[in-house]
Image (cartoon, helix red, strand yellow):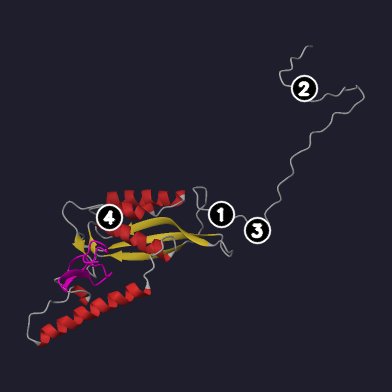
Amino acid sequence: MTIKIEKKIKGYQVVKPDDKPVETPKAAAKPKSAGAEVIQMHESVERPEVLVGSTYKIKSPLFEHALYVTINDIVLNQGTPHEQRRPFEIFINSKNMDHFQWIVALTRIMSAVFRKGGDVTFLVEEMKAVFDPRGGYFKAGGVYMPSIVAEIGSVIEQHLKLIGMIKDPDISDSQRALMEEKRAAYEAGQKTAEDTDMPAAESAEGGAFPASASLCSKCNTKALVLMDNCQTCLNCGYSKCG
């Protein structure tokens, strides 16, 4: 039998009939990790019998009855340094049956996304960007909600912050002090107006911010007031004058 050699010969050896075949050295096996295997969220993770959950109440003027949003979490790597909570499923319950179909569809899709794993925080921004063509509403505290879907997204954001998947931006001590200073200055101005029998702005529902305040484009809260001829937010400290 003739064999054509197409590569350059670097060495050769005559094989005798008595010679045993030389075993090729196997790659050294990688040492097993001493620590436990870290489990990440994925579709193959089976649902435990018991899940940790939180229920949030949504009272919207668009609905006659309140919505109750329940988010259940699975605890991965329990009892290890890698322990973490991840959302596993979501349920929305209400006496109002007018929107039953889309609510069930929404919860099933979101639950499927949760079980898929990975970064599920994108759901928050997608849902908070949904606008109702009939117009939005203000929830308690003066925060504007463009739709009921946006408020559900806000609830999911609140829950993801609770379990550590979303981190709140840190507010520096100087910025916090500036916010307190501006709010104190505004309240002092309101008190002076009352002492001089001038008409003062009424408080908003809940007494958080004045009813005459406008919507802040930064924190989406109705807390923007006119101070020193400049629009200033009493909630986050934003000012149009810098």
Q: Count the numbered circles shown.
A: 4
The residue nearer to you, when weighing 237 against 138, is 237
Q: Which amino acid type corresponds to the residue marked 1 in the rendered image?
A: Ile
Q: Name the quadrant of the N terminus.
A: top right
Residue 57: % across, % down: 30, 66
The residue nearer to you, when weighing 228 against 205, is 228
Where is mark 1, residue-wise? Answer: 39
Nearer the N terminus, badge 4 or badge 2?
2
**Structural distance between the alpha carbons of marks 1 and 3:** 12 Å
Where is mark 3, residue-wise? Answer: 35
Judged from the image, the secondary structure of the residue bearing numbered disc 4 is helix
Q: Is residue 120 left or right of residue 39?
A: left
Marks 1, 3: nearer the viewer = 3
Nearer the N terminus, badge 1 or badge 2?
2
Where is mark 4, residue-wise? Answer: 149
**Contact flag, marks 2 and 3 (Cβ < 8 Å):** no
Nearer the N terminus, badge 1 or badge 4?
1
**Structural distance between the alpha carbons of marks 4 and 2:** 72 Å
Find the magenta span and give its range.
Answer: 214-242
Nearer the N terminus, badge 2 or badge 3?
2
